Amino acid sequence: MIRVSFRYDDNNDPIAFRCEGHAGYDRSGRDIVCSAVSILTINTVNSVESFTEDRFTLETDEKRGYMYFSLNDEPSDDSRLLLKSLELGIKGIVEEYGNRFIKLVEWEV
């Protein structure tokens, strides 16, 4: 199962996310749930890097299916929108495939 969590600022905007695990929907290379989450998260990171000047922290471990991303300092409106878009996409996957393969969980420090 993939577990996704978001950290929010005082305005309730996402400023960080963490994903971990593998969906187990299908075998490696054919797992559309893992692929969808990977595409959304990687595209979000690439978009923040390409379209904003915001600095961020990124940690990944492909074997564990792990990604941690956090905006540093005060994020731009563009980065806030990109993270809101990621959150919307993840919620859509959860609605479509249910908590058996992907789950939104509370942010743990």
Image (tube, helix red, strand yellow):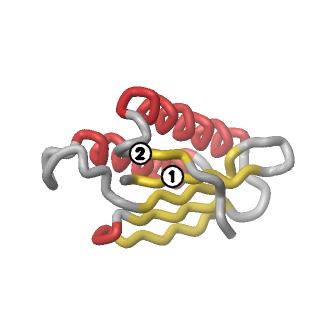
Q: Residue 98 is drawn in which quadrant?
A: top left
Q: Residues within 10 Å of mark 1 (few under 14, many from 20)?
A: many
Q: Quadrant of the C terminus?
A: bottom right
| Position in image of residue 70 (x %, y %) | 62, 62
Mark 1 touches mark 2? (CB < 8 Å): yes
In-front residue for pair 65/74: 65
Relative to 50, 78 lies left or right:
right
- Amino acid bearing label 1: Val
Relative to 88, 67 lies left or right:
left
- Reading the image, the residue beneath label 2 is 102
Q: Relative to 20, say whether 81 is above or below.
A: above
Q: Secondary structure at mark 1?
A: strand
Q: Secondary structure at mark 2?
A: strand
- Residue 42 is marked as none
Relative to 109, 30 lies left or right:
left
| Position in image of residue 67 (x %, y %) | 45, 63
- Amino acid bearing label 2: Ile
Q: Residue at x 70, y 64 (%)?
A: 72
Q: Residue at x 41, y 45 (%)?
A: 102
- Reading the image, the residue beneath label 1 is 4
